């Protein structure tokens, strides 16, 4: 590897692209949730934003905690949604930063820079979900797993993979 350090502009670009990737993944999860609900003939609920959040975080492996107990989800959205969005984000970042000719390791590190924005989105959205869930019982994505899985592991692995793929196949 020649140079695996990231410049400030790449970190800022990674933050922006990572945040957009988080929002796009959340939106895509919401669209899939609504489509499934309508297709099943079920009535739409008023807390679609919250239920989408539960499914989106669950697709990262983050459990939903309700009153100290962990609540499972129905597995509506597979891991493919956030993974695909993050691979695309890493690819876009490498392309935008003109790192398509970089060595594999450098491109992967560049792609993983989407973690800065994705982590911010994951933690901020979790805080919104916690405040939105003060009625009947508080339930929210577990904080530690939100940071570790949704905020760090997924964007580091899949953003890095996107950077690598972007450099190899551009």
Image (spheres, rainbow, N blue to C red):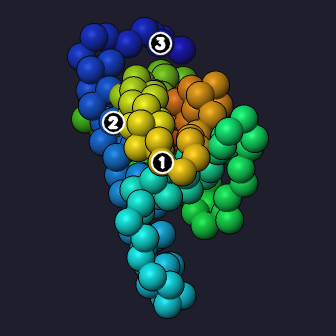
- Residue shown at 41%/52% (left/top)? 26
Which quadrant would residue 68 be assigned to in this image?
A: top right
- Most extreme residue toward the front is 136
On the image, the x and y values in percent for residue 119 come to: 45, 28
The residue tagged 2 is: 19
Residue 135 visible from this viewpoint? yes
On the image, the x and y values in percent for residue 158 come to: 55, 40
The residue tagged 3 is: 4
**SS category of the residue bearing label 2:** helix
Disc 1 and disc 3: Cα gap in Å?
47 Å
- Mark 1 vs mark 2, foreground winner is 1
Around disc 1, counting alpha carbons within 10 Å, would you say few (fewer than 14), some (14 to 19), or many (20 or more)?
Answer: few
On the image, the x and y values in percent for residue 91 come to: 39, 42
Q: Residue 150 or 164: which is nearer the viewer?
A: 150
**SS category of the residue bearing label 1:** loop
Quarter of the picture containing the N terminus is top right
The residue tagged 1 is: 135
Indicate left or right for 83 with 128 as reference.
Answer: right
Indicate left or right for 56 with 96 as reference.
Answer: right
Around disc 3, counting alpha carbons within 10 Å, would you say few (fewer than 14), some (14 to 19), or many (20 or more)?
Answer: some
Disc 3 and disc 2: Cα gap in Å?
22 Å
Note whether 92 is above or below 151 in the view shown: below
User: Which badge, 1 or 2, comes first in the chain's sequence?
Assistant: 2
Indicate left or right for 147 with 97 as reference.
Answer: right
């Amino acid at each position: 590897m020649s140079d695996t350090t990231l410049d400030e502009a790449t970190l800022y670009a990674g933050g922006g692209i990572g945040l957009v990737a988080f929002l796009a993944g959340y939106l895509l999860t919401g669209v899939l949730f609504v489509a499934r609900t309508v297709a099943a003939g079920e009535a739409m609920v008023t807390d679609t934003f919250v239920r989408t959040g539960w499914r989106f975080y669950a697709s990262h492996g983050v459990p939903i905690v309700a009153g100290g107990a962990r609540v499972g989800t129905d597995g509506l959205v597979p891991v493919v949604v956030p993974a695909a969005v993050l691979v695309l984000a890493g690819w876009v970042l490498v392309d935008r930063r003109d790192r398509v000719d970089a060595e594999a390791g450098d491109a992967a590190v560049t792609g993983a820079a989407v973690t800065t924005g994705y982590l911010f989105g994951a933690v901020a959205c979790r805080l919104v979900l916690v405040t939105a869930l003060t009625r009947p019982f508080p339930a929210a994505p577990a904080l530690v797993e939100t940071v570790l899985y949704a905020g760090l592991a997924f964007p580091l692995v899949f953003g890095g993979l996107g950077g690598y793929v972007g450099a190899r196949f551009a």
